[in-house]
């Protein structure tokens, strides 16, 4: 009798879990089938300070790269932001030491109220989608950080990519199980699960040689011996099947966009670009490569990949042809994709007309010595060259710290160099907020530079004096004081 009761309880628990998951899926699907303007209203109440409150809103969606909106509110007032949104847009709202995850839907308003009547900290009210994720922000961030800082390296060396893949997958499964066993709300579990899987895949599985290097060094191998360059074959990518990339749960992930762009840029997958190929042929070639790895040849993931391929083309200043626009309108049953692509094509058309020329895509140019060509562009100038990537958190942190130094030394030319490991559309959006001169290189060009200059990690900085002579090379940001000292000496 007891066994029967236990079985009934387990069966009921399973049914409830299935119902919750189905409801979560339906909510995501029903709330996010459009492209249009979202509205974000922020209201401040009970603020007695005479200083303006500074806010930063960092936004992304499944087709939108990270970008920031900075604004301030003085006293008790409110502000309303109008934000073009593809499906569900996720954002991080920051002020002082406060961070909250919020969400925006097209043709809808999300509202946040900061009430400072309390002497301790503001009481924050949220009126928008996925309130549980907003409420559980701190727990989500803490758990995400602890999972990544958790040492899961083996004490055994690994030399073969597929063996490394299997070990990395095992570690990822264990950490996702921990997420699913937390007392978080179902929405928060979904968000953290999908975000963690996307970030982990981008950082560790899509770069197995670097992953093996890290694991082997952690296991005690000499750093020079650990620098192994293995050839990666297509069968390595069977790990993609485990990610369930067609699942619209990824709408709650703020990193799905970065993962799909990295897959498009992956040199082993070698997926086609859209420039000189019909939509039908692009899909045929892409599914021929990905179907054996994923187990399916159509669905949401393929739509995202196709849309990002077109966005990459647009970001390279190659606007959609009339034929491409016609194909896009005819292909996507979900109109939000075609609406968003045509919108981006339109605004990038305006950007190209007004381009100032400080952003250079050299990835397809056959320049012999790229570094010399760059230095020649800025004669009689002190030059700082910063090797970075859109996905490199230490690089972006260092840029924030260097910003006031740049403003002080306005005669110094700052040059930023990255390659195709930075998804082109993301790079194109990020550089708009980074003052300086930007160069986008091919992986081969970057590899030659790394060999010539002898560096393997980023950020790496090269400082040239006004005679074009290299006077310093730094790997890792040395701190604001040291960096400014080097610039001061270079200017003498």
Image: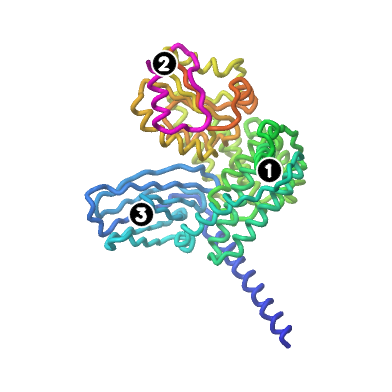
Residue identified by numbered label 3: 41
Q: Earlier in the sequence, mark 1 or mark 3?
A: 3
Q: Quadrant of residue 112?
A: bottom left
Residue drawn at x 58%, y 48% is: 256
Q: Find out whether residue 468 is within the magenta segment.
A: yes
Q: Examine the rendered structure and indicate whether residue 397 appears above or below residue 16.
A: above
Q: Secondary structure at mark 3?
A: strand
From the top left corner, tell me how far across and down residue 75 is, in percent.
Answer: 24, 52
The percent coordinates of residue 67 (x first, y second) are 46, 42
Q: Which residue is mark 1?
A: 219
Q: Position of residue 313 (x, y in %)?
A: 58, 33
Q: CA distance from mark 1 to mark 2?
A: 45 Å
Asked which quadrant contains residue 251, the reply is bottom right
Residue identifier under label 2:
381
Q: Residues within 10 Å of mark 1 (few under 14, many from 20)?
A: some
Q: CA distance from mark 3 to mark 2?
A: 45 Å
Which one is in front in this view, the residue at disc 1 or the one at disc 2?
A: 1
Region of the chain picked out in magenta, as a range: 467-492
Query: Residue at the location (64% across, 49% down)?
Result: 301
Query: Which of marks 2 and 3 precedes in the sequence?
Result: 3
Q: Which quadrant is home to the N terminus?
A: bottom right
Query: Circle 2 sits in a helix, a strand or a loop, which is it?
Result: loop
Q: CA distance from mark 1 to mark 3?
A: 50 Å
């Amino acid at each position: 009798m007891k066994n029967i009761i236990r079985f009934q309880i387990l069966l009921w628990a399973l049914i409830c879990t299935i119902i919750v998951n189905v409801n979560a899926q339906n909510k995501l699907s029903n709330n996010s089938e459009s492209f249009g303007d979202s509205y974000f209203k922020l209201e401040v109440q009970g603020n007695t300070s005479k200083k303006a409150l500074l806010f930063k809103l960092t936004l992304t969606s499944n087709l939108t790269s990270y970008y920031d909106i900075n604004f301030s509110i003085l006293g008790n007032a409110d502000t309303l932001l109008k934000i073009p949104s593809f499906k569900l847009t996720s954002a991080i709202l920051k002020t002082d030491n406060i961070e909250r995850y919020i969400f925006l839907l097209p043709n809808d308003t999300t509202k946040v109220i900061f009430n400072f009547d309390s002497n301790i900290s503001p009481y924050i009210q949220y009126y928008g989608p996925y309130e549980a994720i907003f409420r559980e922000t701190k727990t989500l961030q803490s758990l995400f950080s602890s999972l990544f800082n958790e040492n899961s390296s083996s004490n055994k060396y690994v030399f073969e990519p597929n063996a490394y893949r299997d070990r990395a997958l095992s570690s990822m499964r264990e950490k996702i199980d921990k997420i699913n066993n937390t007392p978080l709300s179902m929405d928060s579990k979904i968000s953290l699960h999908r975000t963690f899987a996307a970030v982990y895949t981008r950082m560790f599985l899509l770069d197995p040689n670097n992953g093996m290097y890290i694991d082997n060094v952690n296991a005690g191998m000499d750093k020079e011996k650990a620098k192994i360059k293995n050839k990666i074959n297509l069968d390595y990518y069977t790990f993609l099947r485990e990610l369930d990339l067609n699942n619209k749960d990824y709408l709650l992930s703020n990193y799905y966009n970065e993962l799909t762009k990295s897959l498009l840029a992956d040199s082993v997958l070698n997926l086609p670009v859209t420039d000189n190929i019909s939509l039908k042929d692009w899909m045929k070639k892409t599914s021929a490569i990905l179907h054996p790895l994923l187990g399916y040849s159509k669905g949401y993931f393929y739509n995202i990949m196709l849309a990002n391929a077109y966005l990459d083309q647009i970001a390279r200043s190659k606007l959609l042809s009339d034929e491409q626009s016609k194909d896009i309108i005819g292909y996507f049953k979900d109109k939000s994709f075609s609406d968003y692509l045509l919108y981006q094509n339109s605004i990038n058309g305006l950007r190209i007309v007004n381009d100032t020329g400080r952003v250079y895509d050299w990835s397809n140019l056959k320049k012999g010595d790229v570094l010399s060509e760059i230095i020649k562009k800025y004669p009689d100038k002190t030059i700082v060259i910063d090797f970075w990537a859109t996905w490199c958190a230490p690089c972006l942190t260092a840029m924030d710290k260097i910003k006031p130094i740049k403003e002080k030394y306005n005669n110094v030319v700052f040059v930023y160099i990255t390659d195709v490991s930075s998804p082109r559309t993301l790079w194109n959006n990020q550089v708009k907020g980074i003052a300086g001169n930007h160069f986008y290189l091919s992986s081969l060009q970057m590899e030659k530079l790394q060999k010539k200059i002898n560096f393997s990690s980023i950020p790496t900085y090269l400082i040239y004096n006004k005679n074009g002579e290299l006077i310093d090379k730094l790997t890792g940001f040395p701190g604001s004081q040291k960096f400014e000292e080097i610039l001061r000496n270079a200017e003498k």
